[in-house]
């Protein structure tokens, strides 16, 4: 029961921390400087994911077939679609699928 209670409390805390910003700032306009800074969030997130996939626990490069396939397909999707969500889904999907099969 305590584990379930902990999960509920953490879930409610996470929901509340996100909802506060939506409820407080829903009727305000986002400043131009913040909008321009937010354009870099998706590329920074994708870069962080790429680094965590390519580096092992010892800080050494660990590149295999699954990693290279995910990077290659992700790069192609990013180049042709310019859509971060499609890039993430294709790259991580192909990486995880090949990683599970190999």
Image: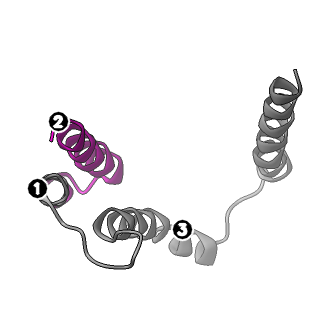
> Considering only vertical position in the picture, is 36 above or below 90?
below
Residue 91: horizontal and vertical position, in percent? 24, 50
71 vs 92, left or right, is: left
Q: Earlier in the sequence, mark 2 or mark 1?
A: 1
Q: Is residue 3 left or right of residue 54?
A: right
**Quadrant of the image containing the N terminus:** top right
Q: Is residue 67 above or below residue 88?
A: below
- The label number, if any, that marks residue 101 in the structure image: 2
Q: What's the residue at 38%, 79% (across, down)?
A: 59
* Residue 39 on image: x %, y %: 46, 68
Magenta highlight range: 75-102
Give the Cα distance between marks 1 and 3.
33 Å
Left or right of 72? Residue 100 is right
Residue that label 1 marks: 65
Q: Is 83 covered by the magenta stretch?
A: yes
Q: Main secondary structure of the magenta part?
A: helix
Q: Earlier in the sequence, mark 1 or mark 3?
A: 3
Which residue corresponds to the image point at 44% horizontal and 70% vertical from the top-left? 44
């Amino acid at each position: 029961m305590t584990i379930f209670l902990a999960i509920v409390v953490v879930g409610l805390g996470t929901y509340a921390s996100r909802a506060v910003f939506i409820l407080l700032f829903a009727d305000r306009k986002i400043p131009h400087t913040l909008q321009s800074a937010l354009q870099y969030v998706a590329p920074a997130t994708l870069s962080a994911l790429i680094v965590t996939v390519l580096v092992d626990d010892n800080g050494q490069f660990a590149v295999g077939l699954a990693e290279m396939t995910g990077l290659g397909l992700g790069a192609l999707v990013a180049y042709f679609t310019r859509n971060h969500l499609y890039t993430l889904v294709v790259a991580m999907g192909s990486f995880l699928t090949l990683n599970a099969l190999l």
